[in-house]
Amino acid sequence: MASRKIEDLHPDLQPICEQFLKEAKKQGIDVLITCTYRNNIEQEELYNQGRIKPGKIVTNAKPGQSEHNFILKGKPASKAFDVVPLRYGKCVWNEKDELWQALGAIGMLLGLNWYGKS
């Protein structure tokens, strides 16, 4: 199972992730980190989704190509983290929802790349 731990992010990204979460909270947005690090086996499972397994295509990155697969000195050091906003404790998966747009704006202000849909 992919990690959700901030400690599994690259050391340079950890404080940015923490700031992202603080800014979201300041704006009244609850956020769940859905993924920090994932290994190549987990990446392959995601890559195969919508290709050779049922479901919607969710990534174009093959194992070892995703920023989530990065390792530093033999330890997880993901250069990416995925989030989902929460409303009343439930995940909001509709990326057109205003909560997603607010999170994207926070991320971009912090210098992150935003891959959510607008």
Image (cartoon, rainbow, N blue to C red):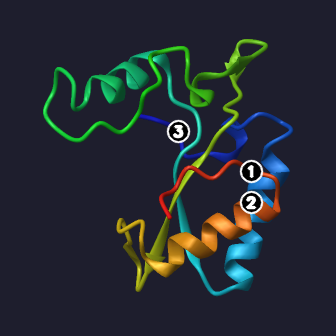
Q: Please state the horizontal and vertical placement of residue 7, each as a whole percent of the image.
A: 71, 41
Q: Secondary structure at mark 2?
A: helix
Looking at this rendering, what residue extends furthest in the front direction?
118
Image quarter in which the N terminus is found: top left
**Residue depicted at 71% across the width and 12% down the height:** 74
Question: Which residue is denoted by mark 2 in the rendering?
Answer: 108
Q: Nearer the viewer, residue 6 or 84?
A: 84
**Residue depicted at 50% across the width and 80% down the height:** 98
Q: CA distance from mark 1 to mark 3?
A: 20 Å
Question: Which residue is denoted by mark 1 in the rendering?
Answer: 112
Dividing the picture into quarters, in which one does residue 56 lie? top left
Q: Please state the horizontal and vertical placement of residue 115, each as a whole percent of the image.
A: 56, 49
Q: Left or right: 33 with respect to 16? A: left
Classify mark 1: residues with Cα within 10 Å, few (<14), some (14-19) or many (20+): some
Q: Nearer the viewer, residue 96 or 47?
A: 96
Q: Left or right: 54 with respect to 101? A: left
Does the CB distance between marks 2 and 1 fall below 8 Å?
Answer: yes
The three-letter code of the residue at mark 2 reads Met
Dividing the picture into quarters, in which one does residue 91 lie? bottom left
Question: Which residue is denoted by mark 3 in the rendering?
Answer: 3
Dividing the picture into quarters, in which one does residue 42 lie? top left
